[in-house]
Image: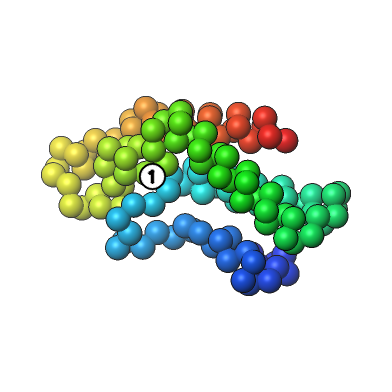
Amino acid sequence: MQETFQLPEDKWAWLNYQIEVSEDAEHYACKILSAAATAIFLDLKNRAQFRDNLSSEEAMKEYEELVMDLFTAFRKEFGHCDCQSLLGFDPMKYDEYPEDKQEYIAKGDWIKECCVHYIEFIVKALYKNR
């Protein structure tokens, strides 16, 4: 994406954040938060380029503030920002769980029980900040 938007590597290195999670990662942020951070980036990139004439430094400062505010609000609402704590299991370590836990994970009800609420929260927060 950095090449697509012709952004300097050192200032926007966060852009590839969590597109893929290493199997060695002990904890990683909720993918919904990662997607929200990307949405904030795309909005700022659009504003910087077409509307507000923000410099890279101004856009990066605003990005960091918006993402930190979002993560803080999410943590306040749900208690955590990492996937494992939010779900109560690590979906990347499916094979390490006993068969009954694998069945629970495979069934996918946890998505409705957890992730849908996180998505709703993020959508409302992003809309509010527009």
**Residue at figure coordinates x 21%, y 42% from the top left:** 102
**Which residue is at a point 58% across and 46% down the rendered structure image?**
67
Residue at mark 1: 82
Q: Amino acid at mark 1?
A: Asp
Horizontally, residue 89 falls left or right of residue 66, namely left
**Above or below — where is 124 with respect to 12?**
above
> Badge 1: how crowded within 10 Å, few (<14), some, or many (20+)?
some
Side of 86 where 51 appears, left or right: right
Residue at x 32%, y 44% (from the top left corner): 84
**Residue 39, visible in the rendered structure:** no
Quarter of the rendering containing residue 4: bottom right
On-image quarter of the N terminus: bottom right
Q: Is residue 29 above or below residue 69?
A: below
Q: Secondary structure at mark 1?
A: loop
Q: Is residue 2 above or below residue 31?
A: below
Q: Could you say which quadrant of the image residue 3 lies in?
A: bottom right
Give percent across and percent down for residue 48: 79, 54
Tell whether 117 sits left or right of 98. Answer: right
- Give the image location of residue 98, x and y in percent: 13, 44
Q: Is residue 25 left or right of residue 39?
A: left
Q: Position of residue 113 (x, y in %)?
A: 37, 27
For this rendering, which residue is in front, 116 or 28? 28
**Is 68 rendered above or below residue 125?**
below
Q: Is residue 38 visible?
A: yes
> In the image, what residue occupies the spot 58% across and 60% down?
15
- Where the C terminus falls, by quadrant? top right
Of residues 91 and 64, which is closer to you in this image? 64
Percent x, y for residue 44?
A: 72, 50
